[in-house]
Amino acid sequence: MGKKSERFKDIAGMIGLGMIFATGLVTIITWLVAWWNGLTTGNYTVLVNINSVGEMFAEFWLIWIVLGFAIWGMYWYVHEAILEKEEME
């Protein structure tokens, strides 16, 4: 049971890291596309609409599940996978 538990914690931690990285990457790409659209067309309403989408996303219930899983995965990855391996050495 110990090996499966450790493997699960490592996988959960990597998923948490992946979610955080992917969310940041999608945010940056979205802002760059909106900025480029405003620069080339002169229509900056896309940037204003992104703020509306951000407000909707903050109220959307799924974000709390995603953030909870990401934080939980980060905790296990840092606490169990990294710190315990350092203590063993």
Image (cartoon, helix red, strand yellow):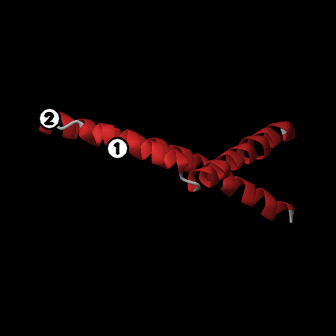
- Upstream in sequence: badge 2 or badge 1: 1
Tell me where residue 11 sits by quadrant. bottom right
Tell me where residue 9 sits by quadrant. bottom right
Label of residue 84 in the image:
none
Residue drawn at the location 79% of the way across and 64% of the way down: 4
Comparing 17 with 88, the one in front is 17
Residue drawn at the location 41% of the way across and 46% of the way down: 53
Q: Is residue 19 left or right of residue 65?
A: left
Check disc 2: other Cα within 10 Å, few if <14, some if 14-19, many if 20+.
few
Q: Residue at label 1?
A: 30
Q: Which callout, 2 or 1, points to the residue nearer the camera? A: 2
Q: Is residue 48 left or right of residue 3?
A: left
Does 41 appear above or below 7?
Answer: above
Comparing 20 with 44, the one in front is 44
Comparing 27 with 54, the one in front is 54
Residue 15 visible from this viewpoint = yes
